[in-house]
Amino acid sequence: MKKYNIRKDKIFEIQKKIDECYTSSSIINVYGASGTGKTYLVQEAVEKYFCDNAKSTILYLNLLEDILSTTAFWDMILFTIWNGDINDKENMLKVDKKTSLSKYLRRCFHREKVINVLFQSVSSIVATIPVYNAQIEIGGIDVTDSNHLAINNEIEKSQLVMKYFKYVSKKHKLILIIDNYQFMNPTIKRYFEIAINQISKNVAFINIQRTDNTHYIRPIAYQNNYINIELTNLSKKDILESILVPLYPDVKILNMVSEDCFKKTFGNLKEIDIYIKANHNNIRNGIFKKNRTKSLENALDSLPQIQRDLVLLATLFPAGIRLEYVTALMKRYFYLKDDVLNEELKKIITLGYVMLNSTRKDLLKLSHDKIGLSIETINSSEEFLEFYYNIESGLEELVQEKKDSSDYIYLLHCYIGICDGKKILKSIKYLEELIKLEYNACSFQYLVELIKTYIDSDKNILLHLSEQYILSLLDACQKICSFETSLEILNIIRSSNVWNEKFRIYYVKVMTQLYHFDIALKEVELLPESNETLMYKLIILEHIGKEAEISKLLNSLIQNRNKVLDKWYYIILRNTAHFFSYEQAYHNLQKCLDYFSKCGTVFEQATILNNISVIQIWNGSKTYIDAEKTIKKAIKKFYEIGSNEIFESYYNYGTLNYLKGNYQKAIEYFEYALEEVPETLTMDVTLLHINKRICECAINPEKISDLEIYILKSLNKSEILQDPWVRFQLEYNLKNIEIYNNGKTDVNPSEIFLPNNDRNTTTLTVFDVLNIHNDYIPICLSLSPNWRY
């Protein structure tokens, strides 16, 4: 886009906020309809920070470039900042070599192998994103076989990004710009905003949101230090005085041009830019032919067919498409030589409709999403549909040709991305192949987002997937605790021919996770008897407090001479450790750990270590040191595989620190747990907040009323009342606070859950007292074993 002398006041406002962030980090919210000049405004504002004496790191990400629907967010950041020595004003990237990520890693981690494995993991994911794929090839890095080299550890990567941001902010300003923020994945968005909010100084976070089909949503970061800048289209006066007069100071026809320009662009800055490029020579020479100037839609319509089809092709691939594939696909449609195609491409780039965007300038993209929105007006035409089906068929051929190349997964994404429901049904093998590759790469978030699109658009696609791929999707939902999506999948296939015992077990599992215990118990009774179905039955009974029935079933299992010692048997031992004495529980859990160390997964080992730490806390102060060591082992294993079940160990470490009197550290770990726990786990979220608020009361007794209010509000949630354990903990704490405040209470928590031992603990709860102005209030805090699944 040309440089225009517009919105100087808003540029100054942004710069002022950036300059002041050294005392308090700030957020700059820029939003408006497509083409109003949001990105251009930010470019103008940050330009001065690219000079040599402006000490700053500037990072720009456009979420439209992420073919994985923003699930590769952390990888995009890590790859962008890896090498440093970048000062790219046009693309808003500035990273000194001294503050590059690779330099930072070498300061923190001395093992070259760890750094190389991380880079391979990052590069293998961004290789599927066209703009980054081109950069990878420039560097001569071979990522062909790197998909399985390292686990796609989202937690580890996200924490590394935040540690790096903290490191940079201690050196100088960090200006972080995220374009098309409205596309940010909600789960990643929540974590990112909470985490960035913890860097209190030297961060200026600029988010740019397009509001054509959605409302602007203000991020939760830096709520006390922000500015909102809403951009709208320019007025006729703005076009004349701020754009035309500075560009053509001696031309006499500018009043007529501004009138015509405003009529045909409605003051949209991107359309004004294209209008000026299309009519530049005539305007410069003082020639104005009103019937020759065109609106953006008319201009697109009047392009020669080959140029229009190049724009259409770029529209189909908003993340960009490599030029070699542009050539291959266009040659299916036009019989022309390379030099002719290159000439037409140069013309359409000059007119401002498309651009080449990568280090090697070999990636075709729309120059602005406004063009994509405008071209939608011809998407139903016969010409477009013929072109679309031709491209679709061409892509399928390319997918087949490139099966053994590093571009295979990228082309699969492209093909699946443009296929309509009917075509997907005919080409279901490609969707299954994509599911397999992304599942093996642990791209669980992406798979959940992918299946949501089919749930919303064409449920029939799910019914045509083979059993193993539906199970992979269900497991991906489990891995990120997307239980509602799991239920939607199960409801779709429940009345189909693919429904079988495996899916019935999943249904029990999901009903339990969503706290529909009555339905889950009814369904589990219909399943054939096995250790697996017994495991789920025990989980449901624990949730509804049927302890006598659980003990009876456990005794029957353990005393059965013909019991099957499969993995489900050992998971039952893991889940029910709290039904045995400490010595027996510890023995059972060690047996589980031995079994899963030989033939299980890291996830299962981590959950067992977490449960060992729970009973070590439960056993009292004599095993607190052992508990801390075990928790750290569990955290390390959860961290290794990127599981958000790490929240359980953070949760327990918080409780352990509370018992040791280290209240500030306890709060820190409860906050870590709250960052990781999925919002769908309402009970865990509630109990974590209770624990955290009890710690806050231990530090500041005046906060006891906040704790009481939170408990009262929580008791109004229907799902909380379903679980007697959770309800007891809330009622017990409320009872004792009310007695402290009023000397009496009507609350009567069940005596079943009160401790009957000298350790002041029960299976999931530890009891203590709060010192409130030398009055001691009995309270209880929760522990968090892995026993749900």
Image (cartoon, rainbow, N blue to C red):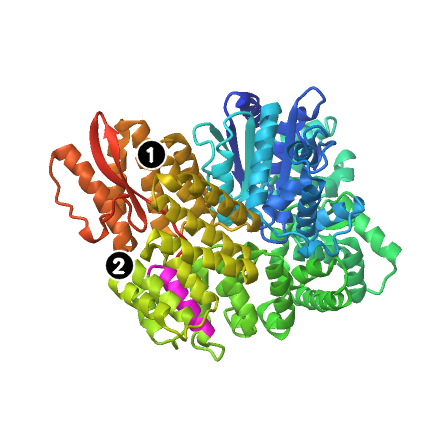
Task: Please tell me in which quadrant of the rendered image residue 675 appears.
Answer: top left
Q: Nearer the viewer, residue 523 or 267?
A: 523
Lateral position of residue 64 relative to residue 194, left or right? right
Q: Nearer the viewer, residue 451 or 179?
A: 451
Span colored in magenta: 502-515
Q: Tell me which amino acid carries mark 1.
A: Cys
Lateral position of residue 364 relative to residue 589, left or right? right
Query: Which quadrant does the N terminus fall into?
Result: top right
The reply to whether the magenta stretch includes residue 214 is no
- Mark 2 — residue? 545
Lateral position of residue 670 relative to residue 144, left or right? left
- Mark 1 — residue? 695
Label 2 sits on a secondary structure element that is loop
Query: Which quadrant does the C terminus fall into?
Result: bottom left
What kind of secondary structure does the magenta stretch mostly adopt? helix
How far apart, in angstroms, are the residues tagged by discs 1 and 2? 27 Å
Q: Nearer the viewer, residue 355 or 135?
A: 135
Label 1 sits on a secondary structure element that is helix
Q: Tell me which amino acid carries mark 2.
A: Gly
